[in-house]
Image (tube, coloured by chain):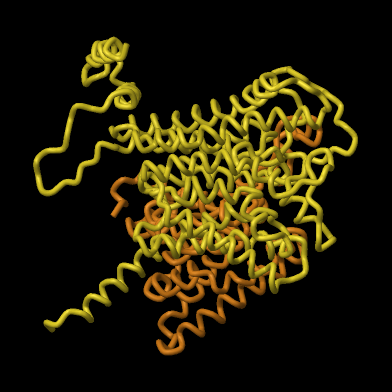
Chain colours: A yellow, B orange
Amino acid sequence: MFNKLYDISEKLRPHFEEGGKLHAFWSLYDGFATFLFTPNTTAKRIGVQVHDANDSKRTMIMVVLALVPAMLFGMYNVGYQHFLATGGDAGFWATFAFGLLAVLPYIIVSYLVGLGIEFTVAQWKHEEIAEGFLVTGFIIPLIVPINTPLWMVAVATAFAVIFAKEVFGGTGYNIFNVALITRAFLFFAYPTHMTGDKAFVRTEGTWGWDNGQALVDGFSGATPLGQVAVATDPSVQLVNTLGEPIGFWDAFCGLIPGSVGETSVIAILLGACLLLMTGVASWKTMTAVFAGGALTALLFNIGGVDTAAANMPWYMHLVTGGFCFGAVFMATDPVTSARTECGKWIYGLLIGCMAIVIRVLNPGYPEGMMLAILLGNCFAPLIDWCVVQSNINMRAKRATIK
Amino acid sequence: MALSEKTREAFLGPLNKNNPVVVQILGICSALAVTVQLKPALVMGIAVTIIVALSNVVISALRNTIPNRIRIIVQLVVVAALVTLVSGILKAFAYDVSVALSVYIGLIITNCILMGRLEAYAMSNGPLDSLLDGLGNGFGYMWVLVVVAFVRELLGSGTLMGFRIIPESWYVANGGFYENCGMMVMPAMALILVGCVIWAHRSLNKEEVK
């Protein structure tokens, strides 16, 4: 079957090459062809080159694969929360199908807008299509609340791809994580749709299915962190959509309100295993983020202010909100994170620490992971520079010849 | 009276090739602060134009009598006097705009464009040239402000000069689908928009790219 596909692809090639009728779409063709097949060309024999069978397209696909569990679980959870809120009982497959239909438009919009801009820029600059958006486009639906209007996602994606990526030179040159810039843009531009009790549970139907259902009594769509942020009582009992108390295991399994991909720690850990086994993500960054978050939360537990956020046990901080998702998929982004080995520890600790500090000390932002990672992105080059400088100084001192 | 090449350049240069904001990157702070709405931006542009033109003329007329060592103080006195005048006029005749601009009218004294023009141009050129140079720089500053404020007010508030452009019925609160972009109201977005103007300007004037 693949041979046939390859033949078709090769047969189409002349149409897209210089002089062909469809040359305007060369970048599109090239993008898809190399997406399916490893290109035949290799670098010329000049100088020393390190070559890995795992090129950047294969790396990106690994990340997308690692995101699949979170995506599938997120879809189920969207349906689950919806039927919980409307009091319906649809069974497993219908619940999943509802979530699939609700999430699908976001995936389509994010890929259409993002890839559209990527293809246009690639064609315009006569460059190959960079594959970076494969992952970004998959992450965006996972980190936006499920009630965000689609045109807002489109605007935010366009903004992020143009201003966080293309103006810096495209894939591999961006300072900030593009998916997070999308979310940050939404967060600052349309705050009413990004926070609050209504944002994270799909109360409306999707594609005309289950429209206009009345909500059950006692419904509250507040996420655990949202509840903590508005709590006046320093020891708050977290509840689910129906007002039933939830604990560590509920947050760990993930059947709670939240952005699509962030709720289930189990699904995220599955992805983390894949990323670590294939060596795509750095275990140092990941561990450091968790360590930084746990230590900071522990410090607040022991001797912080007496508020609900500060009193929330450290292990609850790690499993609620976007902490896990951020630590596994966003902080480890090889482009925007620190690259020196020692720098990865500092970078991760900074993110984990800042995420908890923002959660606890800033009443305006219930969740701090997004801002913490963007701050970490901002400091990553400085951290790397300092690590390299200190290495140079250390070695210079060791040198015996003056 | 035919204007010489130098005189024409004094007026037209700052409008495009030598624009104070997009080429010399001066006066950015006030460009970020007053461009949330179109009206204050326009008034600010007019105020800066008047002040820079008049102070240019005054300093240019006095340039041979100002002792070199105290020239900055003399320039400041002239600018401060004009700023006080403009501020007073605004308070008397356009109070709401004056409130919207708050300290930024007063801060024209420290505007880099003003001191730059006085030092670089008025101190060594005649009053007519200086007048045109001041007007050119004022208008050059104004058009950038107006472009940025146009986008910010339209997308950030849905109005232009206070008139509603995007119909009320489009908004989510009234059963529609539209929301104003809150980013546009933040100074960060003004910086990005100024960046876009510079981007467009550079790609239209390829020879300016260094």
Residue name at image x 32 percent, y 38 percent: A56
Q: Position of residue B9 (x, y in %)?
A: 37, 56
The N terminus of chain A appears in which quarter of the rendering?
top left
The residue at the far front in this view is A249
| Occupied quadrant, residue A13 | top left
Q: Position of residue A21 (x, y in %)?
A: 28, 13
Q: Give the camera-side residue of B198 and A53.
A: A53
Work out whether B22 lies above or below A38.
below
Work out whether A88 lies above or below B164.
above
Work out whether A4 lies above or below B29.
above
Left/right placement of residue B170 relative to residue A325 reads right
Q: Position of residue A195 (x, y in %)?
A: 71, 46
Residue name at image x 34 percent, y 23 percent: A32
Work out whether A269 lies above or below B112.
above
The residue at the far right in this view is A217
Q: Give the camera-side residue of A286 and A340.
A: A286
Q: Position of residue A378 (x, y in %)?
A: 46, 59
Left/right placement of residue A258 relative to residue B146 reads right
Residue B154 visible in rendering: no
